[in-house]
Image: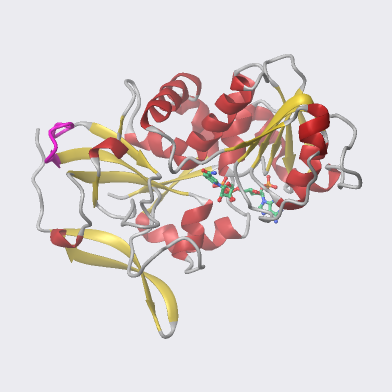
Amino acid sequence: MTQAIPDTYRALRVLKDDQGARAELQTLPLSALPEGDVLIRVTHSSLNYKDGLAVSGRPGVLRTHPMTPGIDLAGTVLEDASGRWQPGDAVILTGWGIGERQDGGYATHARARPEWLVAQPAGTDAHWAMSVGTAGFTAMLAVMALEEHGVTPGSGEVLVTGAAGGVGSTAVALLARAGHTVVASTGRPQEEAYLRDLGAARIIGREDLPALTRPLEKERWAGVVDTVGGATLAGAYASTRTHGSLAVCGLAGGHDLNATVFPLILRGVNLLGIDSVTCPPARREAAWARLARDLPATRLAAVTQTHPLADVPALATEILAGRVRGRTVIEIG
Ligand code: NDP
């Protein structure tokens, strides 16, 4: 049944004034939504590290104020002026600047360009899509990039850094599912059982990763999914095996990269950048199809917690403090 188009919608807005930035739940006229042919009734969003920064008023994510954060959303199409989508279609939207440059998923309604949307894969639902979210999608892109550069099961150990976080947890699960030997690096030793359950063969502490002392360290990793950046990435890069690859996703530990060209030119190491925001549509669809196959809802249940929209400001503080495990789905209601 086609849903009615309301006059107003509810959104978590980040406002900025002389006292700084703050998040507030507001009711707004539907005309306040940004431009975009497709109107979506949002049922679920998710919490990513970037959302934590945006909701907490940290600089660098929201390009203007006021703004509705939320870099992910899933819901149902209400109308599409372009004709590409039909009312009732279940869709997923991650990245493309929503929750950064234009209003995002922390709202009952959103507007978007038709080419940004991915159809909900058959047999999945909006809660599943948001338990994957940008974090799981990014992990999938990282695993695809490693595979395309020759990291195959049996090539050797694949390191995942920031393993208990959203990208890290899903990367561990996806790599293990594909048959890789996964070494999970975490600063939270209490998450060992959780990471083993996801498929990690070995858990190492953050401090157990060798500090960078030389441009080329002992060869250890066939592949790396790095969500931490900084010294962690520099060490992993210098310890990657000949013709191994690193998929570089994040900066949870720092944005510097203190490195030399030696791993590139003496070991043929591939340093692969992952950007989920601008990922082209065909690759998006391929990634979501594989996520639906390899990460069913049953597999994600242990990784996922679900909260209402009103909890987002408190959760934002938690994710920035590194205290959120795995993925957080936000029910918009
Ligand atoms: P989470 O906060 O869920 O995970 C980050 C993890 O990094 C933490 O759980 C923790 O893992 C580890 N960590 C946190 N602080 C530090 C620190 N100071 N030093 C070392 N490790 C640390 O975030 P997400 O998984 O959502 O995102 C991870 C990173 O990836 C972020 O930087 C994010 O911006 C980036 N990202 C990039 C995307 C892209 O398209 N390139 C898309 C999505 C995310 P543990 O407790 O196991 O040590």
Answer yes or no: is residue 216 visible: yes
Estimate the x, y position of residue 289 in percent, counting from the top left: 41, 22
Estimate the x, y position of residue 204 in percent, counting from the top left: 80, 38
State the residue at coordinates (40%, 39%).
130
85 magenta-colored: yes
In the image, residue 109 above or below residue 301? below
4 magenta-colored: no
Image check: 107 left or right of 283?
A: left
Estimate the x, y position of residue 272 in percent, counting from the top left: 63, 35
Looking at this rendering, what residue extends furthest in the bottom direction? Answer: 18
Residue nearest the observer in this picture, 54 or 95:
95
Residue nearest the observer in this picture, 207 or 255:
255
State the residue at coordinates (27%, 40%).
75
**Quarter of the rendering containing residue 234:** top right
Dominant secondary structure, magenta: loop
In the image, residue 230 above or below residue 222? below
Image check: 285 left or right of 58?
A: left
Give the extent of the magenta segment.
79-88
Position of the N terminus, as image quadrant, is top left
